[in-house]
Image (tube, rainbow, N blue to C red):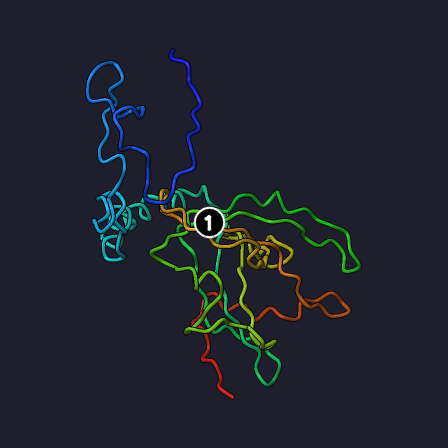
Amino acid sequence: MPTLKSFSGPIREPGNCGCDGPDVPGNSTEGPGLVPTIEPCGPGPGEEQLPGNQPVSDSTYQCSLAVSLQGTVDNARRIAHELGVRPYRIFMVWQERQRNREWIECRRMELIPCKLKTMESVDLELSQAGLEPDGAVKISEVSPAQVNEDDLRGYLDGSLWGKDDPDREFFYEVRLHLRCPDETVRNVSGGTKVRRFVLATEPSLDASRMQWKFGLVDQKIARSRKLVDQTIAPDQSHSPPRPRLVP
């Protein structure tokens, strides 16, 4: 195995790559020192960029193989949901409080396909309000074809929902699928637990795996003296959102 050698050359001015002379390592045209190269010095002054250095336009990116295959990848990932190996459902919820102080949903979107990892990373910490979750969960395999970065941040109709307005809220709702038909009856709470999260990390587009990735933390929500959540709207998951009232 050849021995790797380190090399440090002189500091050169911009545009001078030092590849002009035949004595420079890698510039030999024959013999054992020949190192095949393609335009090692790059374009000169006034010349166009080399093909490998030309920018990729948005139109080229939009017609790329990875973008065109997103629908096929989403269909394949959906199979895991249908097989029952992904028990958590994740919704993006936009809420607004009306004049009567009642919260109503303005929009709800379920992320599918998606993957939650892992709920056990959320610890239960004892506080004055009782046991409260502390820690982050990771969400991955969210489809770039379904949502964009603004959607994941909570934008609605071009504006950031809830910014400078305490009567508007955006959050992520996480709940389990009902495993059995009678689970609502068997559970003391009347159904699966509803967990509410907010963004904890910047949404990251992993284009090589065709997915959005981000982290969520528990939303610290207002509670009454009896520790009742004051900001959860009535369950409207099976009915269309009510129209938003404009003051």
Instruction: Give the position of the N terminus as an image quadrant.
Output: top left
Above or below — where is 178 with respect to 160?
Answer: above
Provide residue 144's location: percent of width, then percent of height.
Answer: 36, 54
User: Is 39 on the left-hand or right-hand side of 88?
Assistant: left
User: Is 35 on the left-hand or right-hand side of 201?
Assistant: left
- Residue situated furthest bottom in the rendering: 247
Query: Which image quadrant for residue 20?
Result: top left
Total count of labels = 1
- Residue situated furthest top in the rendering: 1
Q: Which residue is drawn at 77% across and 52% down?
A: 126
- Residue situated furthest right in the rendering: 128
Query: Which image quadrant for residue 28?
Result: top left
Provide residue 91's location: percent of width, then percent of height.
Answer: 48, 59
Above or below — where is 205 with respect to 96?
Answer: above
Provide residue 193's location: percent of width, then percent of height.
Answer: 59, 56
Looking at the picture, tell me which residue is in the foreground, 118 or 64. Answer: 64
Dot 1: within a 10 Å radius of its alpha carbon, few (fewer than 14), some, or many (20 or more) residues?
some
User: Is 169 on the left-hand or right-hand side of 144?
Assistant: right
Secondary structure of the residue carrying numbered label 1: strand
Query: Given the image, on which type of amino acid does mark 1 rest?
Result: Lys
Provide residue 16's location: percent of width, then percent of height.
Answer: 32, 40
Q: Name the residue under label 1.
A: 213
Q: Residue at x 31, y 47 (%)?
A: 75
Q: Residue at x 42, y 47 (%)?
A: 141
Looking at the picture, tell me which residue is in the foreground, 158 or 127. Answer: 158
Above or below — where is 197 with respect to 211?
Answer: below
